[in-house]
């Protein structure tokens, strides 16, 4: 089996786990598959009658996938991160560990009912139930309802990675804050690049009840409220 270390490729070998992922989608509909690899998910989606668009960046693997010809399968040779947004019932994929974050946030540009993705265990836990507040968690929280469904042992992949994986279910939220997502992320960058400092030493404007708190001790609600205050004041100035 050919794989690219540069692209961080590892391939799921367990049909049982792939079937579990497809089970999480629901009734057959349109589905976008990110990085089908050698087709362990793709074959099940075809068998179950989903209408599949599968986007694969690797040209060698894309050529291999041609053997899966089916009326309900459309294969595209390109990088998902370069793909124009579209509308699907579902999005599914076993995601390369090295680009999990860009893919998760690219997903928000698409319209879908549910996404099922497999990512590195540590990444999944940072999104689903972190020990400390983080830029990643807040950015994910405002975009999605996130549920960590199960862990997957590294033994189920070839080549075997050094870490275990986890399966996440993402459902889009409507973003309702008055400021753009880009503004929020700018505040988060300022905040978590100085996460050992008190908020009063990071921002010139800060609610009095939060002044002595550090970023990792805040709730999502407090962070969104702070961003709202900064946005309303016309400034995200920091010390």
Image: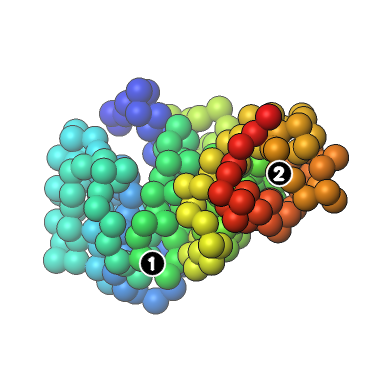
Q: Residue at x 27, y 61 (%)?
A: 86
- Judge left or right: residue 206 versus residue 184: right
Q: Secondary structure at mark 1?
A: loop
Q: Position of residue 130 (x, y in %)?
A: 70, 46
Q: Position of residue 39 (x, y in %)?
A: 30, 49
Q: Which mark is residue 205?
A: 2
Q: Residue at x 73, y 54 (%)?
A: 222
Q: Position of residue 178 (x, y in %)?
A: 53, 62
Of 160 and 148, the residue lying toward us: 148
Residue 187: which quarter of the image? top right
Q: Secondary structure at mark 2?
A: loop
- Judge left or right: residue 167 versus residue 45: right
Q: Which mark is residue 171?
A: none
Task: Name the outermost residue toward the bottom.
Answer: 27
Residue where numbered disc 1 is placed: 112
Q: Position of residue 102 (x, y in %)?
A: 43, 41
Q: Residue at x 74, y 45 (%)?
A: 206
**Number of marks drawn:** 2
Image quarter where the N terminus lies is top left
Q: Establish if 87 lies above or below 210.
A: below
Q: Establish if 137 lies above or below 97.
A: below
Point out the frontmost of discs 1 and 2: 2
Of 125 and 23, the residue lying toward us: 125
Q: Residue at x 36, y 65 (%)?
A: 111
Give how far apart the Cα atoms at labels 1 and 2 are.
38 Å
Mark 2 Cα shell of 10 Å, populated few (<14), some (14-19), many (≥20): some
Task: Name the outermost residue toward the top.
Answer: 6
Badge 1 or badge 2: first in the primary sequence = 1
Image quarter where the C terminus lies is top right
Q: Can residue 150 be seen by looking at this rendering? A: no
Residue 58: which quarter of the image? top left
Would you say the residues marked 1 and 2 are in contact, meaning their CB atoms lie under 8 Å apart? no
């Amino acid at each position: 089996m050919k794989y690219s270390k540069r692209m961080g490729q590892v391939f799921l070998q367990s049909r049982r786990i792939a079937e579990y992922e497809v089970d999480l989608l629901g009734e057959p509909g349109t589905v976008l598959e990110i990085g089908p690899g050698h087709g362990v998910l793709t074959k099940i989606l075809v068998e179950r009658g989903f209408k599949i668009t599968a986007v694969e960046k690797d040209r060698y693997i894309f050529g291999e996938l041609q053997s899966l010809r089916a009326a309900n399968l459309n294969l595209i040779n390109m990088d998902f991160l370069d793909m124009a947004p579209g509308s699907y019932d579902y999005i599914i994929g076993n995601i390369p560990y090295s680009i999990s974050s860009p893919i998760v946030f690219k997903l928000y540009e698409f319209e879908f009912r549910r996404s099922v993705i497999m990512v590195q265990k540590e990444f999944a836990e940072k999104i689903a139930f972190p020990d400390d507040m983080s830029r990643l968690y807040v950015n994910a929280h405002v975009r999605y309802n996130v549920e960590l469904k199960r862990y997957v042992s590294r033994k189920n992949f070839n080549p075997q990675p050094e870490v275990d994986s986890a399966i996440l279910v993402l459902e889009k939220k409507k973003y309702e804050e008055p400021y753009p997502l880009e503004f929020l992320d700018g505040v988060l960058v300022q905040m978590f690049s100085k996460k050992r400092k008190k908020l009063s030493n990071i921002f010139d404007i800060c609610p009095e009840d939060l002044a002595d708190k550090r970023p990792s001790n805040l709730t999502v609600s407090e962070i969104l409220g702070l961003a709202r205050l900064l946005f309303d004041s016309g400034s995200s100035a920091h010390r």
